[in-house]
Image (cartoon, grey):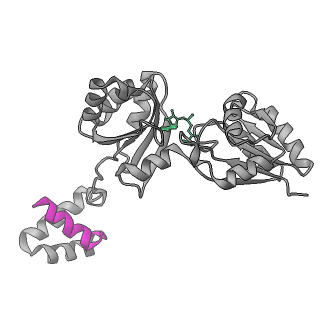
Amino acid sequence: MAEAVLYVIATPIGNLGDLSARAIKLLSEVDLIAAEDTRHTGRLLSHFSIKSSLVSVHDHNEIARAELIIDYLSQGKRVALVSDAGTPLISDPGYGLVKRVREAGFNVSPVPGCCAFVAALSAAGLPSDRFMFIGFLPAKTQARVKQLSELVDQTCTLIFYESTHRILVSLDDMISVYGDHREAVIAREITKTFETFKHGTLADLKAWMLTDANQQKGEFVVLVRGAEPVDDKVDQIDARSAHVLGLLAAELPPKKAAAIAAEITGIHKKQLYEYLLQRD
Ligand code: SAM
């Protein structure tokens, strides 16, 4: 008998060719597929002639469904979890189910594939070494502005999901919090016919969307370049240490002044030296 396992399977975000061979095989073999929307997933399965049974799992029945799925797993059966598009649990249902299945002691195994924000980041041309995935912003303006404001000093790339209904108001709020000139990329309809990556300042992107209403349609990932890093090491130099350094620098070459000030203050001499150079 196959080992009981819950597979968390990524599905395409537009192009059906992106469903992996392993995903197709496992979706065909499992005893049950738990899907966010059974009609939506039914269409995907029929495209690939997959006949496995479907059951719905969404935010409102996840806990109850977890009991059913744990029951399947207890019988040594295999179950798959899918969402409408992309990777389950990423701005999609599934967290409650995965948590409970793990707590019940069963294996949960990912079958990786599409994820809209990873696809967007991989092609946007913004820094990808450090990023923060935020997902959907709140629907209400006040809450949206508050969340954007909390991120204003983040230096990593910020990644948001957005829909047709809110793309313009969200861009407006990003402009009001981050300023006209913050660099950003809109990744629209990734892997679909009208895939578009548009790079510019937030103000450029807003203007571009306003001049072409077609660009306001579809699904969006918005990537915003992080804030310029503040040289916080230099900022950390307190007033007294700066005063000592200033007195020494008035009499000595900068390197010597920094070295002696380092002995007095305990601050690293390189940091003090950089402070002097920036001050001058
Ligand atoms: N679980 C999905 C994933 O792994 O990316 C995300 C699901 S979330 C409900 C749907 C949002 O993902 C959309 O509103 C959009 O922001 C983004 N998205 C999904 N497909 C996309 C695509 N083809 N192009 C751009 N954004 C997409």
**Residue 119 x, y percent position in the rendering:** 48, 48
Q: Nearer the viewer, residue 145 or 280?
A: 145
**Closer to us: 235 or 54:** 54
Give the magenta part as a residue range.
265-280
Dominant SS in magenta? helix
Dividing the image into 4 quarters, which one contains the C terminus?
A: bottom left
- Is 240 in the magenta? no
Q: Which quarter shows the N terminus?
A: bottom right
Q: Can residue 266 be found in the magenta stretch? A: yes
Say whether residue 229 is left or right of residue 247: right
- Identify the residue shown where x is 26% and y is 75%: 263
What's the residue at 15%, 61% (across, down)? 278
Residue 110 horizontal side relative to residue 189, left or right = right
Q: Position of residue 211 (x, y in %)?
A: 26, 25
Q: Quadrant of residue 71?
A: top right
Residue 175: quadrant of the picture: top left
